[in-house]
Amino acid sequence: EPGGDSEMSSLFVQKPESVTATKGKDVTFVAKVDSSQLSRKPALKWLKGKWLDLASKAGKHIQFKESYDRNTKVHMSLIKVVDADAGGYRCEVTSKDKSYSCTFEARIFTKLDLRSAYNLVHEDAGELDFSVLLKKRNKKKLEGPKEEVDVWEILKAAKPCDYEKIAFQYGITDLRGMLTRLKKMKAESKKSDAFLKKLDAAYSADKGKTIHLSVELADPTATVKWLKNGQEIKPSAKYVFESVGNKRSLTINKCSLSDDAAYECQVEEEKCFTEVFVKEPPVTITKQLEDVHTVVGEKVEFEVEVSEEGANVKWMKDGVELNRDTAGSRYRFKKDGRRHILIINEATKEDIGTYYAFTNGGESQAELEVEDKELEILQSIADLTVKASEQAVFKCEVSDENVTGKWFKDGVEVQASERIRISHIGRNHKLTIDEVVASDAGDYTFVPDGYALTLSAKLNFLEIKIEYVPIEEPPKIHIDTSGCGNQNTITVVAGNKLRVDVEITGEPAPTLVTDQHKGKTKLQSGRAESPVISEAEGRVRVEKEQTLSSFVIEGAEMEDEGFYTITVTNPVGEDKAEIYIKVVDVPNSPENVKCTSVGEDSATITWDPPSFDGGVPIKGYLMERKKVGTARWTKLNFDVYESNTYEAKKMIEGVLYEMRVFAVNSIGVSQPSSDSKPFMPIAPTSEPTRLVVEDVTDTTCALKWRPPERIGAGGIDGYIIEYCKEGDDQWVQANKELVEENDYRVKGLPVGEKMLFRVTAINIAGRSPPATLSQAITIRDIVENPKIRLPRNLRSKLIKLVGEKVNLVIPFQGKPRPVVTWFKDNVLMEDKSVGTRTSEVDTILFIRSAERRHSGKFTLSVQVEDMSECADIHIQVVERPGPPINVHVTDVWGFNASLEWKPPKDDGNCEIIGYTIQKCDKKSTEWFTVYEHNRRPSCTVSDLIMGNEYSFRVFSENICGLSNDPGISKNSAVITKTGLMYNPKLFKEVGMNHSPKFIAPLLDRSVIAGYNTAISCAVRGYPKPKIIWMKNNITIEGDPKFLMQNNQGVLTLNIRKPGLFDGGRYSCRAVNDLGEDQVECKLEVRGTQVFMKVLKMQLALNLNPITCQVKL
C-alpha cells in the first residue's frame, strides 16, 4: 500500500473480493470507502496489474458505477469476461497528496472442448494432443497445390490471436519455438528504428534529489512523449524536458515517494521502459526541545521540528514510551507540518522528568521542572459594623479563579440559607448576610481549599438603645486602627478601594450648626491647601449616617497619601482625630539591564534598582531569559534574588540570548524590564598546540603548530604570531593580518640573535592563551649533511618487463639545497630516453618505455658543499625467452621415448628456470602437457600408447613466463610391438538426449510486502532447455523488478520488494527440441500497518534466495 499509515487503512469499509468466474459470465467488484472525515470527495481509480488504468477501457465490456453519500460506494463490472481478464487488480483511493489501495484477483475458468482448444488465444497448450488435430488436417493439405509463401511474413503481419491457426495451417508443430523466433524477429526489426540508446533498466535516487532520464534517437527531428504509469507527463517546474541534437532527457526535480513509478519514452509507435526507485532519507531533528520550568496546574508544551512533513516522531518520558493508547487524556499529541508538539494539559509533580523525541535519524531531550503554585491574596476581607436589619457583606479576592473555599463563624462552618448566601464568581468569594441580628456578630474566616491560609474579619453588631432620661455627653471619635501597625496609620494598595468607618458618640448627638467650625464634621487632607472633603458623590468622599461617618476612596492613587483630620462638635464639647493614609504599589521595572561579561556557558547580568519601590522596600528580583528569535521566556529563579548582579548558567555556547528582570516587593511583582541587548555565551579557544620550528635561515624562521584542543562555537578566525629577543618582554607582532593556516615564516629577523616566538588564536571572544616556544632560537643558516632516503623496494634489484614504465621517486635531505647528479654504470648519464626531475626534497628518474639496454646500475649522488652521499639502484629489464633449439628424439623403447634439446639463444635477459614438454599423437593431433618446470635439457616420456606415433614440443620458461614459440622435435617416436595386432571394439555412443523434467518443483509461498523474496526449482534435460518464467500465464520479460538465474539447472526467480499487486500464480516452463515441462506455485503477498511502517524506515533489505542443488 503506497503511502499507507494508520489513518489510510481505516478508509476502506468494504474491499473488493477475489472471484473465480466462468468464461462468458458477468463479474462485479464492489469497494466501499469511508469519506466522512475527509473535507472533499476522494478520487478512486481501478487498475489492472501494476499500472494499467482501466478508466481508459470503459465501455461495453468494462462498466463503472459510483454513489456518494456519507460513504463512497464504487462498482466495477466486467461484462462477458474472457481469459485476458484474468489476473491481479487494484483499487486505489487518493486524498490530497496521499494514496492507499487494496488488491484482489480475478480467475477465469474455461470449459474446454476440441473446438475451444483449437481457438485458444495466446494460452499454454497444456495436455492437449495437437498431433491428432494435425492428422485431421492432412487430407485438407493434399487437396491441391499451393503457392510458396513466407510464413514468417504472414505471422509478423497477423494478430496474436491468429498465431495458432496459422501454425496449424502451415504444419508448424513447435509453437513455442515459433513464438520465440517471431519475438526475436520483431525485436531485431525494432532494434534500431527509433532509439540509438534506450533508457537504463532502472534508476534510483534519494528523496528530494534530482533524477535524469535520457535517450538517443535515430532521427534528431523526432518528437518524444514521456509517460508515468501510462499517463503522459506535461512540462512543469518538477518535470523538465530537454532536447539537444538527437538526445532527449527528462529531469525530475525534488523527487518524492510519488515519483517511484514506471516511466516510458515513446517515439511514434515505439517505446522504451524503465523504473525509478526513490529512497526516503532519514528524518533529522532541525529544532531541538527546550527545558521547561512551570508551576502545578499550568499547561506545558514540548515542541520539536523535523526535516520532513508527515514523519513519525516517538515520545518517551524517562525511558517509557508515550502514545495515544497509554497516555490517556493526560497527554495530547499535535502535528503541524514539520512541527510535533507534546501537550501536558495540567502539570503535576508526577510529570517531572526527562522527555525525549525520537526519529529514525536523530533524537532530542529536555527537562521538565514543576514547582508548587502559591496562592496570592489580591483583596482580603475587612471588619464590618452593622446595625440590626442591615446587610453585611464579606468579600475577598484570590489569584486563582479555580480555587474553592469555606466560610467559618467562630470556628463553625457557615451553611447557606435564605438569609445567608455564599457565592464564588471568578476570583471573588462573597458571604452575604441579610437582616443582621445580634447572634450574627462574631469572627468570620475564609479558608481556601488545599492551602494553609486563612482570611479573618470581625462582624460588630451595633445595638441602638433608647433612654428616656436625657444624658449629656461630649462628642467622641472612635477610630479602630489596631491592624494598621503605626497608630492612626492606614495602608491601602494603589487601585484598591479604601473605606474608613469612624464611630461618633455623644449626647446629644452631634448636630450641624451654622458656624463653620461648630456643629459640623470636617475631614481635611494633609495637602498644602487642606481642602475640606465634601459629602457629595465622587472618588474621594464622606458618607454620614447618624453616629457613623465613613471616609471612602475609590481606586486609591499615590496623590491620595497624606494626613486627614476629623472634627466633631455638639453643645457639650468638641473632639478631633487625625489619621494618615499611606498608599503603596508594586515597584517600577528595573532599569539598565545589560550583560557585562560572558563565558563558555554563562553570562553575568547587572541592572539598576527601580526608580520607585512602590512605597515598601524591595525584597529582590526575578530573572528570565530567552533565545533570540523565540517567544518563550524561561524563569531562572523561583526564589527572589537580592543582589543587582546575577550569573546565568547552563546556556548553549554560540546561541544569542536576551534577559529581562522583575522587581518584587511585599505588594507584588513589577512589570518586566526592557530586554537586554542580545548577547552570546562564548569563550576564547585554548592555546595552540605542538608549536615547533620547522626551518631557520639567516633572516627567517618557519613555525608550525596544531589547532587548539578546545575551539568552541566561536571557531577560529586566525592566528597572531609574535616574537621578541631573549630576555626582553617587548613582543612584536609579525603578521599584519590574521594567519588562517597552521604555519608561518617570520621574516626580517636579525642575524645571530636568539629569539622567542609565540602564537595566539583569535576568535569572536578574543585572544586565547599564547603557545610559546620553550627555548630561544638562534637566527642563522643551518648546514645539514646530505642524506638519501632510499625506499625499501629499491634496495634490492628492480625487475621490469620490456615496455613497462619506470618511475622512481627518491627523497633526500640537506641544507643548503643539495646538487643532484645521476650516473649509469659509473658514467655520467646522458641517455635522452631516461629522464630526471629534481626538487628541493626529492628527485625522480623515469623511463616511458623500458628496453633491455636500460638494464644496469644507476647511481644517485647528492652533494652539499664538500659533503656528498651516493646510492646505487640496480634495474633489470626482462622479457620472455626464445624457444629451445635442436629438439629431437634420441631413443624409443617399449612405451617410452627419450628427448634432448639445447637452451634457447635468447634467455630474455634473465635465468631460464625450466621447460614445459608437450606430446601429440598423429590420430588426435591434440597437444597434452607431459612435464612442467623441467630443469634439465632432457627428459624421458613414459606411458605412451602402443601403435601411436608421437611428436613433441618444448617451451622454455623464465620469470616472465613461457616462450611465445616452442621448439618442435625434428623426428617422431613410433610405439610398435612385433606380432601383436590390436583390434579395438566398435564404440557405441550412449544417447544423452532427453526431454526436460523438473526434479524439484516450485513451492507455494507467503511473503510480506516490501521484503525481497525468491522462488526456485530444479530442472534436468539435454540439450539444455530454454527457461520461461510466467506470472498469471503472462511471460515475465524486461522487468527490472525480476531477476532470473540458472545455476547448473537450479532455477531462481528473485523478486525485488514485492507489492500486494505482485501476488498471483507463478510458473516456470522448460522447453527443448524433445519436449517441455512446467511447474507452478502460488505467491501470496501480505501487508499490515506494522510491516508497512517498518518498510518505510528501511532503505533496503536483501533476502538470500532459497535454492536447491541438483547434479546433472
Image (cartoon, rainbow, N blue to C red):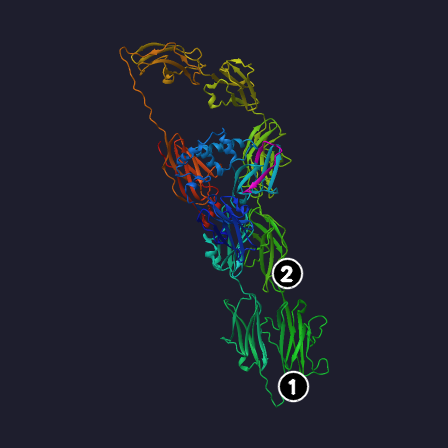
Q: In which quarter of the image is residue 997?
A: top left
Asked if one can make out residue 11 in the rendered structure from this viewpoint, the answer is no
Magenta residue check for 223: yes
Asked if 634 appears above or below 1103 in the picture, the reply is below
Q: Is mark 2 on a helix, strand or loop?
A: loop
Q: Residue furthest front?
A: 143
Residue type at mark 2 is Asn
Q: What element carries label 1?
A: loop
Could you tell me residue 465's position as x and y percent?
59, 86
Q: Give the range drawn in magenta.
A: 214-230
> Which residue has dot 1 on it?
508
122 or 771: nearer the viewer: 122
Nearer the camera: disc 1 or disc 2: 2
> Which residue has dot 2 on it?
588
The residue positioned 64% from the left and 36% from the top of the image is 737
377 or 993: nearer the viewer: 993
Residue type at mark 1 is Pro
